[in-house]
Image: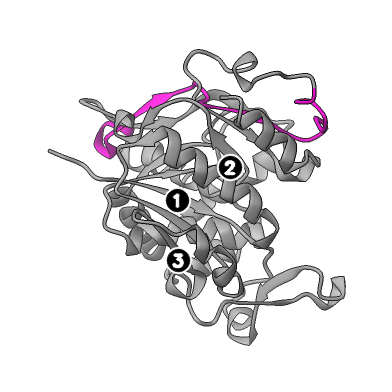
Amino acid sequence: MTQSFAIATPSYAGDVERCRLLCASIDRFVTGHAAHYLLVEDADVALFRPLEGPRRRVIAEFELLPVWLKSWPDPLSLGRRRVWTGPRALLRGVPPLRGWHAQQLRKFALPLKSDEDVVLFADSDMLFLRPFDVASLATQDGVRLYRKPDGIAAEMREHRGWCDSAAGLLGLPAPDFPSPDYINNMVSWRRDNVRALMDHIESTSGRDWVSAIASRRGFSEYVIYGYFVERVLGLDRARHWPDPRELCKVYWGGEAGAIEGLRSFEEVLEPWQVAVGVQSFIGEPVEAIRALFETQ
């Protein structure tokens, strides 16, 4: 059966230039997708609208999340940051959320609204550097699922909390550690599994899925999906095959300036990698990243 594919990128105003570079890299190197969705806060729509094209669409948050969860200037930061809250959210037991929480909720919401069978998530601070056919994620065994065996150790406190939260949300026993890790750039989900996941969450919790997930505040969308397709459905039934390889080379915290000595990103890519991610919070200027991209 023929499957359709989409790319989805949650982003925000502070990452618009990085997102512009991602879009340029997709237009240059990526094929096989029917659409590329940019998922942004309502206030950022006009800023991202110029990035739209024949297969690229900006989707405002109001199209994805319930009206009772809205972003406001955070008075504790003198308005420099945003907080997602509201009286109706608080009444539902949902604490004030940050932007990264809202981005995760947008990821869950997109497959409930879009038509494509498979969604590949590509963060706005990454870019493609080699030709990549999104349809290659699907084989006769199903769709690729990033899964690193024993990737989350018991001493990884934040990650362990995400695992405990996912298990509780899904009605599963407390997880054993080390646990598989499903968190990465270029993670692909099946739309039918996301819909089944939301049905399961609502049945198990007796609440709408946004309230059930967001009330926990400490959660990982990739761990929740990974636990569901592996521990509730089973990978065969979920039509996923596990892959521990990272398709995107990522520079995380503490590596500011790490790319300064590079003449080309080709120097750091493994043969199977097609993209690089330079996390925006490590302080690498987007101009330096663009300069390296232009050497490709």
For the residues labelled 2 and 3, the Cα–Cα distance comes to: 29 Å
* Residue found 73% across the figure and 19% down from its top: 262
Q: Nearer the viewer, residue 13 or 220?
A: 13
The mark that comes first in sequence, 2 or 3, is: 3
Residue flagged by tag 1: what amino acid is it? Ala
The mark that comes first in sequence, 3 or 1, is: 1
Label 2 SS: helix
In this rendering, which labeled residue sits more in front, label 1 or label 2?
1
Q: Nearer the viewer, residue 134 or 103?
A: 134
* Residue found 77% across the figure and 41% down from its top: 285
Q: Are marks 2 and 3 in contact (CB under 8 Å)?
A: no
Check disc 3: other Cα within 10 Å, few if <14, some if 14-19, many if 20+.
many
- For label 3, the residue is 59
Check disc 1: other Cα within 10 Å, few if <14, some if 14-19, many if 20+.
many
Pinpoint residue 49: horizontal percent, then vertical percent.
51, 66
Q: How many labels does the image show?
A: 3
Q: Is residue 71 visible?
A: yes
285 relative to 146 in the view: left or right: right
79 relative to 50 in the view: left or right: right
Q: Give the range drawn in magenta.
A: 235-260
- For label 1, the residue is 8
* Whether residue 56 is situated above or below residue 208 in the rendered picture: above
Label 1 SS: strand
* Whether residue 227 is situated above or below residue 271 in the rendered picture: below
Residue 163: which disc?
2
Quarter of the rendering occupied by the N terminus: top left
Q: Is residue 164 visible?
A: no
Q: In the picture, residue 135 is in which quadrant?
A: top left
